[in-house]
Amino acid sequence: MAEFHDLAELALNREGQSWGNLGYWQSETEYSDACRAIALLLGEQAGLDRQSVVFDAGFGCGDQLLLWLEHFRVARVRGANLSRIQTAYARTKLAKAGFSAAATAIVQGDINDPEVWRATLDRNKPSHVLALDCAYHFPDRVAFIALAHKNLAPAGRLALTDFMLSDQHRTGSFTHRLLRWMLKRSHIAEANIVRRDLYLSQLQEAGFGEVRIVDISEHVMPGFARFIRTFRGSGKLGGSGPLKYAVTGRFLQWAHRRSILRYCLISATKTGR
Ligand SMILES: C[S@@+](CC[C@H](N)C(=O)[O-])C[C@H]1O[C@@H](n2cnc3c(N)ncnc32)[C@H](O)[C@@H]1O
């Protein structure tokens, strides 16, 4: 059966790369480099090091798992991804790179399902839960945050990149109706997109402290839109691909220019047990 999250983004990448996020375009001009740059930012904000045990929620085709292992040299990675085809791809990628233990430690499944966490984790609770450019796609982001808190080791860190509603945005407006249409079309639950204040209190209510939210919209949304506008390989996308990316690019440009959505780098530390 066709999946919403598939291998379509391979066409945007350089040979051998398979990222699928919006990228960080401060100085990058190539899609794969921009995607790696945002993953690096996330890993740095999370404070990954050789002791880290990472649980990666929504790891795409696995490039970021390799980055945690090879660049940050983390001790272990585990994770879950809803997409069957991407999980199989990531497993092969890790095994080919010599990380066979990691290849078997990642599973296909819905991150909102507590069983998926149980099946993946053993007695060693993760020191880090990461979600790179995917929490807005989860069925229920607040429930994900609660599961991350439950499964993290004491003082463990949650780090993610995510969309928020801009403070200036008015719900009930025509713009808001357009936003709702676009969210539906993009398989994003409306309840996942909230203002910064509410996002912060959702993290605090779940038991997280030391919350840091950095607005990186300026280097994400217009950069992705510009890349899609100038992308020369649209023939490789096939089917509805060119239209899908063109619509997403224009939408992000609009949502950024009109201050509707913000894109943020978020980290928080588990308090309590
Ligand atoms: C925009 S892609 C980002 C992929 C990857 N993190 C990257 O940066 O290249 C969103 C990812 O979230 C995953 N995802 C969406 N809903 C999910 C869910 N409920 N549980 C686990 N993974 C999910 C998708 O399968 C996809 O891999």
Image (tube, grey):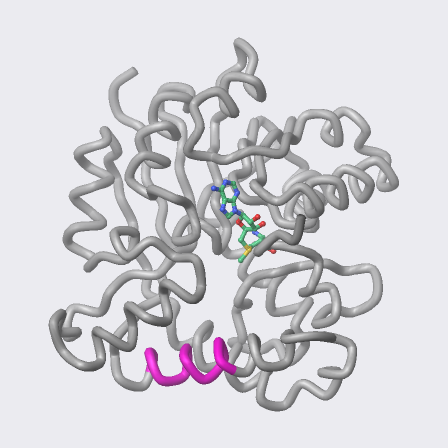
Horizontal arrangement in the rendering, residue 105 relative to residue 208 (left or right): right
Q: Give percent across and percent down for residue 15.
A: 83, 66
Side (left or right) of 34 relative to 142: right
Q: Is residue 8 left or right of residue 243?
A: right
Q: Is residue 4 left or right of residue 61?
A: left
Q: Residue at x 47, y 32 (%)?
A: 128
Q: Quadrant of residue 164?
A: bottom left
Residue positioned 67% across, 65% down in the render? 9
Along the line of sight, the residue nearer the viewer: 163 or 113: 113
Relative vertical location of residue 63 with respect to residue 178 in this rendering, above or below: above
Q: Is residue 66 above or below residue 253?
A: above
- Name the residue at the front extreme: 1
How far across and how far down the image is residue 61, in percent? 69, 49
Q: Is residue 121 above or below residue 264?
A: above
The mark tally for this picture is: 0
In this view, the residue in front, 72 or 9, is 9
Does the magenta run of residues contain 252? yes
Quadrant of the drawing holding the C terminus: top left
Residues in magenta?
A: 247-256
Query: Which one is nearer the viewer's eye here, 240 or 161?
Result: 240
Q: Position of residue 159 (x, y in %)?
A: 42, 44
Q: Where residue 137 appears, x then y in whole percent?
A: 43, 52
For the point 24% across and 39% down, which residue is it? 203
Q: Main secondary structure of the magenta part?
A: helix
Measuring 68% from the left and 76% from the top, which residue is drawn there?
30
On screen, residue 217 above or below 63: below
